[in-house]
């Protein structure tokens, strides 16, 4: 991310797509939101092979993680709900079923490599199967929503950045938020109770079915944990899997 100024002197931020990124997906989502709950896309030519995005400048050093937990969750809930809109006609976004379907292969491989993981992986896969078969809605989702993806702005107090957009149900988008600050949860003697309370409170505040949020939280925590182990990030993998076990 480079801090720049436009020709008229307006502050902006230039985002250069990292390797393996899909900037055209982010561009399409930001263009559709048009600044509603998200950083505003100022310029991103579709023909630009670099995938550069010119964005409004936010206070990148101030995210929701700077707030106390209860306040951060409240602000996060108010921000993410603005993103949940009907996707544009002919949109390029994959579905929750498609994205999570690809992820199941790595989860099965992790269970095969370490049989101790099998019960958690089996539970997560079973939850996914039930959830995708009965998905109640197809809305545009952030895809990677968490406190660090919500930054302070001038135009609005809090705006989201860094979407990995897809279409599906709101419960999927909330699931990553449930395990925010997971290291603090693990270190706390009341971690399991707090985790389950988050599921309940977020589901109630955003009118999402609690059982569906619970299921997606389980799936996403196990998938993240299995992927972290496969990538050699053992501590993060174990933390996410311990969290999943609480659910």
Image: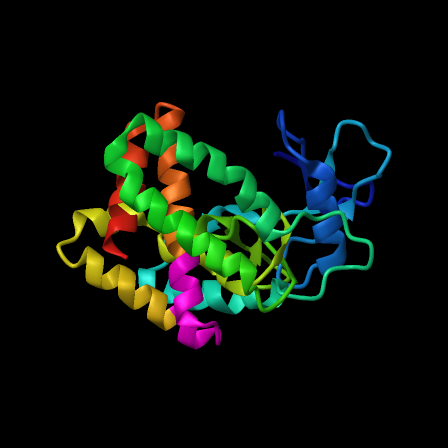
> Is residue 42 toward the left or the right of residue 150 in the image?
right
Image quarter where the N terminus lies is top right
Task: Identify the residue at image location x=25%, y=50%.
Answer: 245
Q: Residue at x 40, y 70 (%)?
A: 210
* Range of magenta residues: 202-216
| Above or below, 25 relative to 105 | below
Q: Residue furthest left?
A: 189
Q: Is residue 204 magenta?
A: yes
Comparing 137 with 143, the one in front is 137
Does residue 182 belong to the magenta stretch?
A: no
The secondary structure making up most of the magenta span is helix
- Residue 57 image position (x, y, % from top left): 64, 47
Could you tell me if residue 34 is visible in this image? no
The answer to whether residue 126 shows anywhere in this view is yes
Q: Residue furthest right?
A: 47
Residue nearest the observer in this picture, 18 or 67: 18
Residue 83, above or below 224: below
- Quadrant in which the C terminus is drawn: bottom left
Residue 243 to residue 213: above or below? above
Query: What residue lies at 28% left-to-right and 64% top-to-bottom?
Result: 196
Q: Position of residue 75 (x, y in %)?
A: 46, 66
Quarter assignment of residue 82: bottom right
Q: Return the x and y of residue 70 as percentages of the image width and height.
A: 33, 66
Query: Looking at the image, which is closer to me, 160 or 19?
Result: 19
* Residue 15 occupies quadrant: top right
Colouring scheme applied when the structure was drawn? rainbow
């Amino acid at each position: 991310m480079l801090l720049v100024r436009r020709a008229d002197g307006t502050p902006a931020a230039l985002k250069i797509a990292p390797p393996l990124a899909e900037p055209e997906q982010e561009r399409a989502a930001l263009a559709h939101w048009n600044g509603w709950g998200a950083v505003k896309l100022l310029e991103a030519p579709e023909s630009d092979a670099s995938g550069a995005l010119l964005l409004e400048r936010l206070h990148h050093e101030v995210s929701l993680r700077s707030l106390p937990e209860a306040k951060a969750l409240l602000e996060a809930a108010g921000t993410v709900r603005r993103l949940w809109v009907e996707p544009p006609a002919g949109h390029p976004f994959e579905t929750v079923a498609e994205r999570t379907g690809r992820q199941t292969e790595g989860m099965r491989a992790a269970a095969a490599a370490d049989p101790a993981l099998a019960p958690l992986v089996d539970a997560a896969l079973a939850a996914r199967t039930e959830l995708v078969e009965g998905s109640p809605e197809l809305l545009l989702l952030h895809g990677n929503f968490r406190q660090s993806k919500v930054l302070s702005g001038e135009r609005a107090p809090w705006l989201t950045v860094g979407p990995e957009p897809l279409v599906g149900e709101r419960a999927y988008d909330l699931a990553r938020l449930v395990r925010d600050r997971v290291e603090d949860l693990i270190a706390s003697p009341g971690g399991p109770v707090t985790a389950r309370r988050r599921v309940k409170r977020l589901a109630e505040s955003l009118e999402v079915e609690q059982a569906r949020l619970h299921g997606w939280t389980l799936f996403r925590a196990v998938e993240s944990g299995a992927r972290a182990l496969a990538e050699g990030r053992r501590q993060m993998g174990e933390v996410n899997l311990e969290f999943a076990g609480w659910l």
